[in-house]
Amino acid sequence: MRGRRRILGGEAVEIVSAVVSALPGQRERLRAAMLGLPGVEIHGETRDGRFIVSIESTGEATAGDTQLALHRLEDVLAAALVSHYNVPGA
């Protein structure tokens, strides 16, 4: 819904979705670190440390910049881009 308001308001919208895997035993730490990044929302999680996340651009960072920051988190084993949606400002 936030993205829809931005489109209607004429602002650019960028949304990324990804699957992220935690290093063994680091699921809790990774969850906390990801939620500390701007625009990150966790939509699903498994007991073995896999997450389904979306990242939306914010006033602090673009979704692409946040995705790169997510890749650099200490407890990330792997992060795979699933989709990238971008609507330029009107």
Image: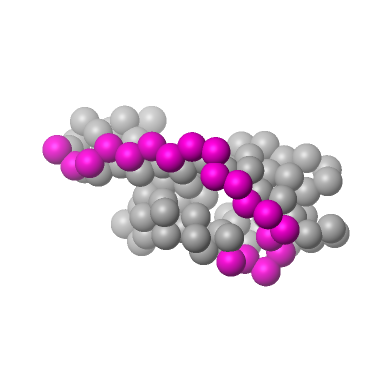
Region in magenta: 72-90
Query: Quadrant of the rendered structure where residue 61 is?
Result: bottom left
The image position of residue 10, as x and y in percent, is 17, 38
Determine whether, in the image, residue 22 is placed left or right of residue 52: right
State whether residue 2 appears in this view.
Answer: no
Of residue 21 and residue 2, the one placed in the foreground of this image is 21
Is residue 85 a member of the stretch shown in magenta?
A: yes
Of residue 48 and residue 38, the one placed in the foreground of this image is 48
Of residue 28 and residue 74, the one placed in the foreground of this image is 74
The image position of residue 46, as x and y in percent, is 78, 40
Query: Quadrant of the rendered structure where residue 14 is?
Result: top left
Determine whether, in the image, residue 77 is placed left or right of residue 69: right
Q: On the rendered image, what quadrant is the C terminus found in?
A: top left
Query: Quadrant of the rendered structure where residue 2 is?
Result: top left
Is residue 58 a member of the stretch shown in magenta?
A: no
Q: Residue at x 72, y 58 (%)?
A: 77
Determine whether, in the image, residue 11 is placed left or right of residue 3: left
